[in-house]
Amino acid sequence: MAEKMLNLRVDEIRFPFKAAVPASARIFRGEEFVIKDYGELVSPYLPSSVAHVSQKVFGVKSILVVPLRSKEELLGVFLVGNTNDDFSPEERETMRIVARHAAIAMEKALLYEALEREKKEAEAMAEIAKDLSTSLDLRRTLRTIVRYARTLCQCDLSAVALYHKELGCAMITEYEGARTDVLKDLKIYPGKGLGGKVLETGRVWITDDFLHDPRLTRDYDREAKTEGLRTNLAVPIFFQQEIAGIL
């Protein structure tokens, strides 16, 4: 049992800014504090089985939360476990020093990342513009857009759906990163699902939990489950002030 828990891999732990998750508000305020009740970490995003791993395997009794700040901006937090009930003033000061150095390193890394992103965006715009000016093949241009959308957003899957006024729906024309063909020629109707919200409102829509978002209808749950989709962003494509599709 202990060996299995030691091998447990946690790729991402979310701390949503919601009052229902006790530690979240304090984290987002950039406070330094100690967690002694593992219930403060438990949320729909962090199951109790994961929250208790360090306690059960390593005997951790308290967790020190130290903010990572760059000037006045909160970049992240350190969470440090201790087998004692609390942290000494010396231990806290040590972690503050580590956090300051880590924040400087993170700031430099984020700046480099931003410059690289701008470079990639410029390259993407240049290639898309080239396709638009030299090719009459719409699907080729859409494939280029889908490919760069996936690369620039660093997402698992991207797709474009063209709106067909005569059918009263948008249909997925091109996609990249899909594990199955469940999205092929999928029709998206106004008001239904995330894409349907875009068609209905003409606005950008985003959800961090597609299958449980109460704002969305359940018309496309099967496709989302098949592809393992969770966080989704849908953006309208306009032509002559009318919706021409969804990205």
Image (cartoon, grey):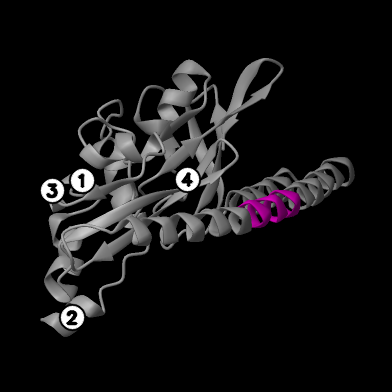
Tag in front: 3 or 4: 3
Tag in front: 3 or 1: 3
Disc 3 to disc 1, C-alpha distance: 12 Å
Residue tagged by mark 1?
44
Q: Earlier in the sequence, mark 3 or mark 4?
A: 3
Give the answer, above or below, for where 80 lies relative to 36: below
Residue 181, can we see it? no
Q: Earlier in the sequence, mark 2 or mark 3?
A: 2
Disc 3 to disc 4, C-alpha distance: 45 Å
Nearer-the-camera pick, 210 or 9: 9
Q: Is the residue marked by circle 4 packed among few (<14), some (14-19), or many (20+) residues within 10 Å?
A: few
Q: Position of residue 134 (x, y in %)?
A: 89, 46
Instruction: Kindly indicate whether the residue at mark 2 contacts the one at mark 4 (C-beta within 8 angstroms).
Output: no
Nearer-the-camera pick, 5 or 108: 108
Give the farthest residue toward the right. 134
Name the disc covering residue 185, or none. Answer: 4
Give amino acid for label 2. Answer: Lys
Name the disc covering residue 4, or none. Answer: 2
Q: Position of residue 63 (x, y in %)?
A: 25, 57
Disc 1 to disc 2, C-alpha distance: 22 Å
Q: Secondary structure at mark 4?
A: loop
Residue tagged by mark 3?
39
- Taking the image as shown, residue 57 lies to the left or right of residue 155, namely left
